[in-house]
Amino acid sequence: MLMQIDGPLAQRKQYRRVRLFGFELDAVNMAEAVDSIYEWVASPEKNCRFVVTPNVDHAVLYQQHAGLRRAYANASLVLADGMPLVVAARLLGHQLPGRVAGSDLAPALFAAAESRGPLRVYLLGAARGVADRAATEIASRWPMVGVVGTYSPPARFEGDPAENERILTRIAEADPDVLIVGLGAPKQELWVDAHRDQIVASVTLCLGATIDFLAGEKKRAPCWMRGAGLEWLHRVASEPRRLSGRYARDAWIFPRLVWRQAKSELRRRSLQTAHPNG
């Protein structure tokens, strides 16, 4: 269903949307997502639209985090990163074209520059030196992509107004087409939403560990695991101390979110059947 949106969502493309666990996912494939980003890059207006890529962990956090809900409401594109979201949507009777992983979006965007023209990119996030290594890798793989700046902010920088101003000034001076933010969720979404009127870039992508993947700092799951929806298993095996608690929590809560929405869908359909004209 196409929806007319006023206010903060007015910059969202008019794609069909699927409402899942309280937020709306844009029902797009990778090619459509890339097309949208390039369309915004080509726009003469430097209104910083931003893209979020929810997975299961985001869906769980969203239920109790008012700031994350505001960020999602203001996002210009909401893409289903996690395969469990795609499967859950289909089980609930909603069709999504498939997974559009944030870690695949950046390479797809860079590859498209070969035919669409030069792309200026700024990398914000990851540990010190990692974004620089990612920039070197990008330059070698995608000659039409120019990394015009990198920065690894200090811990808890988001609470320091002076540091935030320095970051925004660095980005403005670099004048990128695309800002890639890899600070982890929900920090990256909250920071981008809080400063979206000050970010000088056509598009900001909230992409989690993508800078680490581009730099080779972290290894992605093999293609067969990604295709089978098992990338989460590879990640938790790679970083058990950091991720096992999060995945255990998500495994407990996420099925309940699916069940709760399934009951809500059943009630809605039952009411529609009982009162078809009401």
Image (cartoon, rainbow, N blue to C red):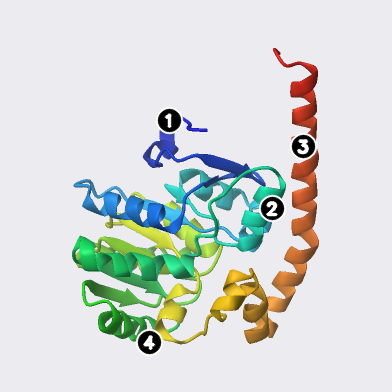
Please tell me which residue lies in front, 21 or 270: 270
Callout 4–callout 1 Cβ contact below 8 Å: no
- CA neighbours of label 2 inside 10 A, class few (<14), some (14 to 19), many (20+): many
Residue ID at (47%, 65%)? 102
Q: Are there few (<14), some (14-19), or many (20+) residues within 10 Å of tag 1?
A: few
Q: Nearer the viewer, mark 4 or mark 1?
A: 1
First reached walking from the N terminus: tag 2 or tag 3: 2
Callout in the foreground (2, 4): 2
Among the two numbered marks 2 and 4 on one chain, the one whose residue lies closer to the N terminus: 2
Q: Which residue is mark 3?
A: 264
Tell me which amino acid carries mark 4: Gly
| Residue 163 position in % (x across, y down) | 37, 69
Which is nearer the eye, 69 or 231?
231
Q: CA distance from mark 1 to mark 2?
A: 29 Å
Indicate the amino acid at tag 3.
Ser
Query: Residue 177 location in percent, x, y?
Result: 25, 60
| Residue located at (64% from left, 84% from top) | 239
Residue named by callout 4: 129
- Per the model, the C-alpha gap separating discs 1 and 3 is 26 Å
1 and 3 marks in contact (CB < 8 Å): no
Amino acid, disc 1: Asp
